[in-house]
Image: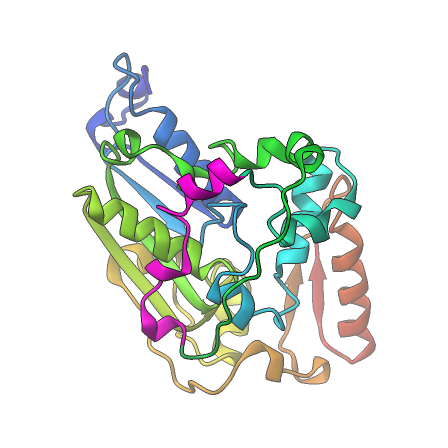
Amino acid sequence: MKTAEDHGVDPSRIVICGDSSGGTLTAGVVQALVNRRDLPKLRAQILIYPLLQYVDFELPSYQQNKGILSFSKERILILSLKYLNKDLSLMEAIFKGCHIPEDLRLKYQKWVSPDYIPHEFKKRGYKPRTTHPFSKELYTLVKPLLDLVFSPLLAEDSVIAQLPETFLLTCEFDVLRDDGLLYKKRLEDHGVKVTWCHLQEGFHGTVFLASYGKGKVLKKLGICSDLSLLRVALDGIPPWRDSKLLIKDLKVDEMPESYIVTCEFDVLRDDGLLYKKRLEDNGVKVTCL
């Protein structure tokens, strides 16, 4: 950012963007830059269905979308614990909230609470979570999950109030929906301008799919096929042609031509390879990179 002008970039128009865990990083980086007086102020941040907290895995969106296996709270914690080199046996206790001390629980309730989720987002069902005993050992092991790098929703008010204009996209059928709703509220409560786009029939990864295969997967799902990340950010919600058509309704032999990217040093590599085999076994054309 210090050398932006050397590369023909207007330093007053720098925007940081990220989706999913990239949204986590975007929010964290933007917060970290708030007090950097040696750098130009960011013009805006774009957060696409970001993961913003590891405090409550029983928010309405987690309960309502637990059946969407393509992106679940289990997958979130598996990847996160592997990143921290922690044992996966800790997952169940984290889901119960046993990693949060009472003093922090009271503090975080100001920012992470189902009470701040609008009623309209609870209509598909929600049951208040049960309180479980705190485990100091668990807290010590997974304390990094509460750092702002992982949980930017937990930033102090003094930081939130200085954040730049924000574009925020959430999807109804996404466990991370309520993370976005809670962050939206915090930003607006502190006078930060927020442009919010909610895809009523969207799911985690919707925008990513728009970039591949000329939008054929999204077209199959009834979503306008000519979307791109910036077009969503600038122009708003895409038109939907069939609100009842969800990804869970698709059968393998009905899938369109697919493009799959796998990486050798990636825990998800074999997921892609297995799905590639299933598609090809059912006569679906697959391009794999």
- In the rendered view of the protein, which quadrant contains the N terminus? top left
Question: At which x and y percent is residue 168?
Answer: 33, 53
- From this view, report whether residue 38 is shown above or below residue 222: above
The residue located at (38%, 71%) in the rendering is 121
Q: Indicate the position of residue 10 as horizontal and vertical percent values.
A: 22, 27
In the figure, is residue 120 to the left or right of 20?
A: left
- Position of 129 with respect to 67 (left or right) is left
User: Up-down: is 207 above or below 149?
Assistant: below
Magenta highlight: main SS = helix
Q: Which residues are magenta?
A: 102-122
User: Residue 170 falls in which quadrant of the image?
Assistant: bottom left
Does residue 27 lie above or below 202 as drawn? above
Position of 7 with respect to 206 (left or right) is left
Q: Nearer the viewer, residue 200 or 226?
A: 200
- Is residue 97 inside the magenta stretch? no
Q: Is residue 262 visible?
A: no
Whether residue 21 appears in this view of the structure is: yes
Nearer the observer, 181 or 40 = 181
* Residue 135 position in % (x across, y down): 67, 39
